[in-house]
Amino acid sequence: MHQERPNILLIMTDQQRFDSLGCYGSKAVPTPHLDRLAATGCLFENAYVPNTICTPSRASLMTGKTVPQHGVQRLYDNLSPAEVCFPRRLQERGYQTALFGKFHVSSRFSEAKERHPHDGFDIYEWCHDPALHHDSPFNAYSQWLQEQDPAFREAMIDRGRRTGPVPRDRHMTHWAAERTIDFITRRRTSQPFFCFMSLFDPHDPYDDGPEELLQIVDEGSLMPPAAVQEPLGDKPLAVQRASEAAYPERDAESKLLAMRRGYYASISLIDQEVGRVLQALDDSGCRDSTLVIFSSDHGDMLGDHRLLTKGGFFYDACSRVPLIMRWPQQPEAAGGRRRQQLVQTQDITATILAAAGYSSRELTAWMPDACPLFTGHGARTRRQEAVSCFRTNRSVRPEMHAVMIRDDRYKLSLYYYLDEGHPVDGELYDMDEDPGEVHNLWHHSQYCGIKHDLTVRLSSWWVQQLLCGETPGGSTTAESRKGAMPHDS
């Protein structure tokens, strides 16, 4: 195996379902560049996020820790200043590091005011959301718009998330690609680099993409929302309430079609811009020496199970994401491999640091639940279960804590209500026989043994997190008490 430290390019989208790319079976829009990345790299079929909203999931990516370990549980929590983000450790290995786009390990309000003291980026060109925080001194996208088209910037400030469609040459996805290409082209060739191209799309609102890309969407291949006729009565109380609050009451079919068209149009733009970045990597001569990673922080329900966007539910549309890696120097990450093993976001972190030369002992000390994904880069490369957590903001009632455990066959979700006296309820799915998660086995007596075994495993997992040491925890900004909801991320 080649021992040189690779360059590392991490491309992360926001709110992208696992089944939204051609290489994962989608036919809604062509995604040739990401499909080619998968065909020459390694595609992971079962990558699950540690939390189904942005902030906790991204905090896990940046620290390599589980949600209980880093303590960021809610949308507006702030990552403790004592935590060290992995780009800081790459700097210690001599990497030049750069961020172009979204960070979001803390509240957007906090990040608009100050950087995390250990974010680890030499170049920090931040933009949380293309429509927000244009007054932040860190908002490099806004500064770029001011140079390119001041009138459009003013219109975006005035209209916010109602700005759309956004022309391609003014779009945040295009900006992030431009800045990434410039960095690759002008990088210090005396150092390996780490570049984090972090996009906002295909996050809602779904009508902010270039209008011409709507014509690329094959409506005939857009699958209708799944499991919309299933009875809500056997669902957990939290899922029932989320459905009742979010699902369109009128013109549901046309509204959901518009959402899905806009969503996949954004994915088409992402693929095209990623293609430009990968071509720049080829042109720079460092393709073979670069580990490329593509993934997302969580998915999007898009009407499946009568639910929208994301939140306290763990259906695959929300908790499972694409994960593609290509590393020509590593045979396990080349040649179009497809791997079925369970993977979590923090495993990306461990893989990156292992590739940079950190030992399995160091990784275990920093991120004990994370698994480097390639042989020879850590003592453990396969996990037995994937766990995802969710907790409501304090302003949301009923306050609720939910957790999911997924093994090779079954998925168990438990819901705990903190202020209503409602009993614990949940869901159990046989993912082999029921991949659409339609038949909830929670109330079936013949599955009591499986429920018990998974609950015991989940309890054991939770105790292991506590035994890893006292977590610094995440402070919560005042904005979380103003009724903000998960879609505000």
Image (cartoon, rainbow, N blue to C red):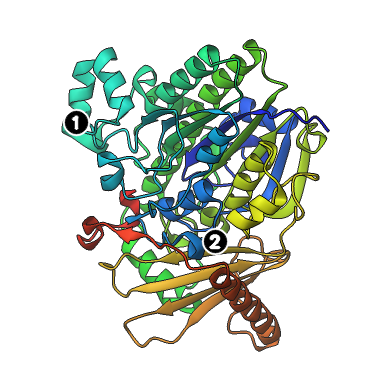
**Residue at horizontal 49 percent and vertical 65 percent from the top:** 68
**Residue at horizontal 42 percent and vertical 72 percent from the top:** 401
Residue flagged by tag 1: what amino acid is it? Ile
Front label number (2 vs 1): 1
Q: Is residue 297 visible?
A: no
Provide residue 344's location: percent of width, then percent of height: 61, 54
- For disc 1, the marked residue is 157
Residue flagged by tag 2: what amino acid is it? Tyr
**Residue at horizontal 41 percent and vertical 50 percent from the top:** 253
Judging depth in this view, the residue of 466 and 24 nearest the camera is 466
Kindly report the distance in space between the C-alpha atoms of the residues bearing marks 2 and 1. 35 Å
Provide residue 364's location: percent of width, then percent of height: 65, 56
Judging depth in this view, the residue of 146 and 269 nearest the camera is 146
Image check: 3 left or right of 349? right
- For disc 2, the marked residue is 315
> For residue 93, what is the image quadrant?
top right
